[in-house]
Amino acid sequence: MSHPSRAHLDAIGIPVWVRRGTVRATQSTTPSPEPAETEPAEPSAFRAAMDPASPRPGGTDATGPSVRQALESIDAQVRECRKCGLHRTRKRTVFGIGRPDAACMFIGEAPGAEEDARGEPFVGRAGKLLDAMLAAIGLTRGDVYIANIVKCRPPRNRDPHADEIAQCSGYLRRQIETVSPRLLVATGRVAAQSLLSTTKPIGKLRGRIYRYGEDRLPVIVMYHPAYFLRSPLEKRKGWDDLVRLRAMLSDHAAGGP
Ligand code: URA
């Protein structure tokens, strides 16, 4: 596996210690302006894993306009949804964004204020850090698909309640079935606990592969980028999760689990 470039570690705020007299350690949270280092040399297996043309569990074909149309039709139902009380306070529903045929699908918790205003997931500060984390393994948000457990913002960004998650779960399940990714990334405690139907703390859930649904889609658990905004010294764990994610995508391309 290739090593991350210093620019990408800088971008997610992981300090890089180098010999005195070369380049100084840094903890910046903004991408470094060093174009030569912004493209890590990815193993070909990883690139192949991101190729939607390679085989998927269940043999579904996620390419073509029908997938886009199916997603639009679920989105239209979500926009009209009044199944739980969150519809009363939302400005906009936040369905999902990214490649309709993505190999990898990130699932966060719920929209925040900025997402509620724009109707798009992960566009606030945590979203910017998620973008930087993706860039650290050579991906953009356009390479993956991003959605949330619930599609409407809980007031004052509280955790979504169990009944709100339950009412929204059918939309998410259909979204996952339609995109048909090869890997789900549960981003944060709420996403991990609700996708895996567990109450275990996130620290205990990381580092293993779980399975979701009838196709036994692999799921990995990562800390939420908002956690790293609150606790920047923990970002090394985020990097470990990204390395695991990249390895899994490579394994899939090579015919692994
Ligand atoms: N946090 C999430 O979990 N999802 C978003 O869309 C934004 C912030």
Image (cartoon, rainbow, N blue to C red):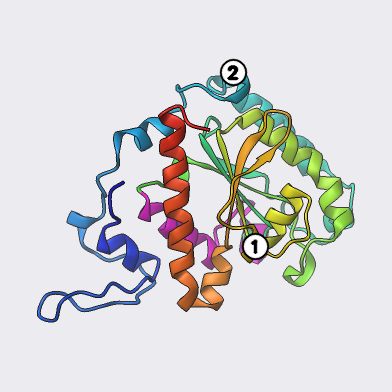
Q: Nearer the viewer, mark 2 or mark 1?
A: 1
Q: Give the residue pinned by disc 2.
A: 59
Residue found farthest to the bottom: 20
Prevailing secondary structure class for the magenta stretch in the rendered image = helix
The yes-or-no answer for disc 2 within 8 Å of ligand 1 is no
**Residue 154 position in % (x across, y down):** 78, 63
Q: Which mark is residue 204?
A: 1
Q: Please say whether residue 102 is one of the residues in the magenta stretch.
A: no
Across and down, in percent, residue 67 comes to 61, 24
Q: Is residue 69 above or below residue 248?
A: above
Is residue 100 left or right of 160 when viewed as pictured? Answer: left
The numbered mark, 2 or 1, whose residue comes first in the sequence reads: 2
> What's the amino acid at mark 2?
Gly
Q: In this view of the protein, can residue 149 be seen by the observer?
A: yes
| Whole-percent x, y for residue 169 in the image | 79, 44
- What secondary structure is marked by label 1? helix
- Residue occupying the point 68% across, 26% down: 70
What kind of element bears circle 2? Answer: helix
Query: Do the CB atoms of the residues marked 2 and 1 lie less than 8 Å apart?
Result: no
Residue in the image at 86% along x and 46% along y: 167
Please give the name of the residue rendered at 63% of the width and 60% of the height, measured from the top-left corner: 188
Direction from residue 57 to residue 48 in the image, left or right? left
Residue sticking out furthest to the left = 21
One can see residue 50 in this view: no
Q: 251 or 186, which lies in front?
A: 251
State which region is magenta.
Answer: 112-137
Q: CA distance from mark 2 to mark 1?
A: 32 Å
The answer to which of 152 and 224 lies nearer the viewer is 224
> Can residue 135 be found in the magenta stretch?
yes
Residue type, label 1: Lys
Could you classify mark 1 by the number of other residues whose Cα lies within 10 Å: few (under 14), some (14-19), or many (20 or more)? few
Name the residue at 66% across, 31% down.
Answer: 71
